Image (tube, helix red, strand yellow):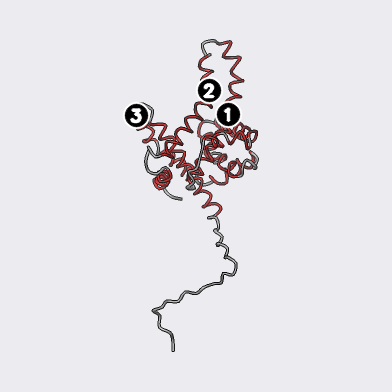
Amino acid sequence: MPTASEIRARARYSLENSIFSQIWLMLLVYSLLVSVIAGLPASIGSAVARNPALAAALSIPLTICTILLSGPFEYAMARIYLRVAGGNKDVSVSDVFVGFKECFAECVILQFVRSALIFLWSLLFIIPGIIKAYAYSMAFYISQESGGKKTWRECLEESKTLTDGYKGKLFCLDLSFIGWFILGALCFGIGILWVQVYHQQARAHFYEELKVIKYGAPEVEDAPKADGEDDVVFKDPFEEEDD
């Protein structure tokens, strides 16, 4: 497994080594769009907090709205970051909403079950909840690579398998971004938007590395020969022929 520094270097390379590169700014805009839309229920809840009766009446509907939005968006962003990690920077706004089109119900169930499990484990003090959060952290990467065909149970189980023995490595990777987040906060908080993109891109590369370690590198098939093409042996013209 590469070090946290090497994973961050890969992320910067995918983001073209510039905070003002087109792909970095594009991902920033998409992340901001997702945060605004997914955060609407929480914003509404804060706005009505001064009215206890209204806040109580809206608490359950707003929670449901949050779950309905967060799952499909996380699915979509996992796909976008993995695509960029693979060198494909052809992403558009429509990709942000792909989770609502491909597997809305499965995304919602996965998000709900994962959050519920982490919450329940957190009741046994904080540390078990943190461990489970890292164990299930790859679930949406797995879900989107299957096009939403894998069930929530399969995604969670495969995420546990992938992260087995590597949760500490992922924790260290996250920990290595603390300085960056502090620096982003010092830039009037705006810099955190750039750091968040950098962090998520690094996590996507970590997932790709986990797949190679657990399942091996994908095989590359030889290019098919054209019709009538024979094997050609190229001989060194300076090689002396044996008598």
The three-letter amino acid code for the residue at tag 2 is: Leu
- Disc with the residue nearer the chain's start (3 vs 1): 1
Question: Does residue 70 sit above or below 174 in this rendering?
Answer: above
The residue depicted at 63 percent of the width and 34 percent of the height is: 104
In this view, which residue lies farthest toward the front? 228
Question: Does residue 232 sit above or below 58 in this rendering?
Answer: below
- For label 2, the crowd category at 10 Å Cα-Cα, with few meaning under 14, some 14 to 19 and many 20 or more, is some
The three-letter amino acid code for the residue at tag 1 is: Leu
Question: Does residue 122 sit above or below 236 in this rendering?
Answer: above
**Which label belongs to residue 69?**
1
The residue depicted at 56 percent of the width and 60 percent of the height is: 221
- For label 3, the crowd category at 10 Å Cα-Cα, with few meaning under 14, some 14 to 19 and many 20 or more, is few
- Disc with the residue nearer the chain's start (3 vs 2): 2
Q: Identify the residue under disc 3.
A: 187
Marks 1 and 2: in contact by CB < 8 Å?
Answer: yes
The three-letter amino acid code for the residue at tag 3 is: Cys
The residue depicted at 51 percent of the width and 48 percent of the height is: 210
The residue depicted at 42 percent of the width and 76 percent of the height is: 236
Quarter of the image where the C terminus is located: bottom left
Question: x%, y% of residue 174?
Answer: 44, 39
Question: Does residue 2 sit above or below 129 in this rendering?
Answer: below
Question: x%, y% of residue 133?
Answer: 53, 36
Q: Identify the residue under disc 2.
A: 40
Residue at disc 1, secondary structure:
helix
**Which label belongs to residue 90?**
none
User: Cα distance, mark 3 to mark 1?
Assistant: 29 Å
